[in-house]
């Protein structure tokens, strides 16, 4: 069975045949390649090199708030489940200390174009704590007038007053976790969330001038059916969000403990999961949403869709973004940043994170300095993920290579995908076809030097 929209074709038989484990490429190399030899000292040395030559790059800030007061069984995020509100007060103190240390290292007058609060549940913080963190950000950094300032929201845990506060302190984009409105599914994953409370948060966000509202859905959850998800999609489309993400639930209970509470026999069969995906793509594109890539959809007038049309779309640890040239400064436990040709990740456990800051050391657990080969492959994966095509000549010029020679092995492998109709290779271009777009991760994996051994695939989730 195959269904087609203008820029996307869902060929279920092909997807079924080619589905395999693979990274989501929010970075290349992926975070599991980071090394502990890269530490706070390595990071500081690279920050010192940022402005050599007088070129100042704007910043993107990521703030990780790990707390949730209930556990969603599907969750694979780094979180701390607690009802103890004093924990966030302590965390905010350390977070602001880390921010001050980073600001001192970066130097004065650093311009921030993008800010994202993720988690966990960022609104676990009290209204006063949100004010305190935002005041500290404005004290240490210069937020541009029309920047992209977003926060993830759990609609079950937020009041209209808090949404008004978020708008007042500068947030202009909001992302809501829904997953599925079906009650049986919600019970199976321990996340009971009424349609009305979700809609109320959206109404409050619009009333407070938020530019963009995004809704997250997950397919492949326990007790999910085609009929049930069809009703969820109808409700979501009626709510009219600007963006939608439809994530594939990756059941990996050996890695993520909360998933052990999900009964495998409740998970939808592989074919049902594919049918749900096909249904979602059809309904969303018929409702006017544009397929951005991976699992993201947006209205044609949304900034993501505009950026993609103009060739400005970028991909980072928060997914798709319109800000491509930013260095990413990450604050909070487990947060991942990017400065120049490096990645760095903070300690995953609160105790280690606090301990480093008590010693006046940035809480960096591990990282990576990219070599020349990593950089060219990262740029290729970015181009394919964001624009579904690349011009070989631009890589020859930018990286001083002969593309066809440098990637002879990869181009030979891509021939198989070309025969399957996933892409077209010409002397000048590699272009992904509408049929290949749903399998873009497979295509990118060909360029991943670290996946050259078969065992490597086991640590990742399924592509679809």
Image (cartoon, helix red, strand yellow):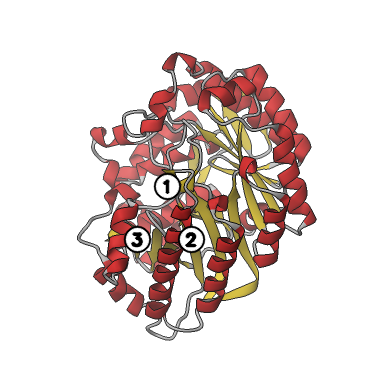
> Would residue 196 appear left or right of 267 to someone viewing this image?
right
Between 135 and 264, the one nearer to me in the picture? 135
Among all residues in the image, which is located at the extreme left?
37
Query: According to the image, label 2 marks what residue?
Result: 62
Query: Which residue in the structure is indicated by mark 3?
Result: 343
Q: Position of residue 56 (x, y in %)?
A: 47, 80
Check disc 1 and report its element: helix, strand or loop.
loop
Residue 401's spot in the image, x, y percent? Answer: 33, 62
Foreground pick, 190 / 152? 190
The residue positioned 54% from the left and 59% from the top of the image is 116
The image shows residue 431 at horizontal and vertical percentages of: 52, 45
Percent x, y of residue 298: 67, 46
Q: Nearer the viewer, mark 2 or mark 1?
A: 2
Q: Residue furthest top?
A: 265
In three-dimensional space, the C-alpha distance between marks 3 and 2, rounded to whole angstroms, equals 13 Å
Q: Residue at x 34, y 58 (%)?
A: 346
Q: Nearer the viewer, residue 347 or 297?
A: 347
Which structural element holds mark 3?
A: strand
Q: Quadrant of residue 45?
A: bottom left
- Residue receiving disc 1: 25
Q: Marks 2 and 1, how far apart in space?
A: 18 Å
On screen, residue 343 versus residue 218, left or right, reads left
> Residue 366: which quarter of the image?
bottom left
Quarter of the figure with the N terminus: top right
Task: Mark 3 or mark 2: name the one nearer the start of the chain.
Answer: 2
Whole-angstrom CA distance, mark 1 to mark 3, is 13 Å
């Amino acid at each position: 069975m195959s269904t087609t929209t203008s820029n996307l074709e869902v060929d279920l038989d092909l997807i079924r045949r080619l589905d395999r484990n693979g990274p989501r490429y929010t970075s290349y190399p992926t975070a599991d390649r980071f090394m502990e030899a890269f530490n706070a000292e390595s990071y500081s040395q690279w920050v010192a090199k940022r402005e050599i030559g007088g070129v100042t790059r704007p910043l993107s800030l990521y703030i990780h708030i790990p707390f949730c007061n209930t556990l969603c069984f599907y969750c694979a995020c780094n979180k701390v489940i607690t009802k103890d509100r004093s924990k966030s007060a302590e965390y905010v103190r350390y977070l602001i200390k880390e921010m001050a240390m980073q600001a001192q290292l970066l130097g004065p007058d650093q311009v921030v174009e993008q800010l994202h609060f993720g988690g966990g549940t960022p609104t676990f913080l009290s209204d006063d704590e949100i004010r305190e963190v935002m005041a500290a950000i404005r004290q240490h950094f210069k937020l541009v007038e029309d920047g992209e300032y977003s926060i993830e929201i759990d609609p079950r845990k937020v009041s209209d007053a808090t949404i008004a506060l978020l708008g007042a302190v500068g947030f202009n984009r909001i992302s809501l976790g829904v997953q599925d409105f079906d009650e049986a599914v919600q019970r199976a994953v321990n996340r009971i969330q009424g349609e009305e409370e979700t809609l109320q948060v959206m109404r409050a966000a619009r009333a407070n001038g938020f530019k963009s509202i995004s809704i997250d859905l997950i397919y492949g959850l326990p007790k999910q059916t085609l009929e049930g998800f069809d009703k969820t999609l109808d409700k979501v489309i009626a709510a009219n969000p600007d963006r939608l993400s439809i994530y594939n639930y990756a059941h990996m209970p050996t890695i993520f403990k909360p998933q052990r509470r999900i009964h495998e026999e409740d998970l939808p069969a592989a074919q049902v999961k594919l049918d749900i995906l096909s249904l979602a793509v059809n309904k969303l594109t018929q409702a006017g949403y544009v397929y951005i890539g991976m699992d993201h959809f947006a209205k044609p007038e949304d900034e993501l869709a505009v950026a993609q049309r103009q060739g400005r779309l970028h991909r980072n640890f928060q997914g798709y973004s319109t800000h491509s040239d930013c260095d990413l400064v990450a604050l909070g436990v487990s947060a991942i940043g990017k400065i120049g040709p490096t990645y760095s990740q903070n300690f995953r456990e609160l105790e280690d994170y606090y301990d480093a800051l008590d010693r006046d050391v940035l809480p960096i657990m591990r990282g990576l300095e990219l070599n020349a080969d990593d950089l060219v492959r990262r740029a290729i994966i970015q181009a394919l993920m964001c624009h579904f095509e690349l011009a070989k000549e631009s890589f020859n010029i930018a990286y001083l290579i002969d593309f066809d020679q440098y990637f002879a092995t990869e181009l030979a492998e891509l021939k198989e995908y070309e025969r399957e109709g996933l892409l077209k290779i010409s002397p000048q271009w590699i272009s992904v076809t509408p049929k290949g777009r749903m399998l873009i991760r497979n295509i990118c994996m060909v360029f991943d030097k670290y996946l050259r051994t078969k065992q490597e695939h086991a640590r990742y989730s399924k592509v679809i």
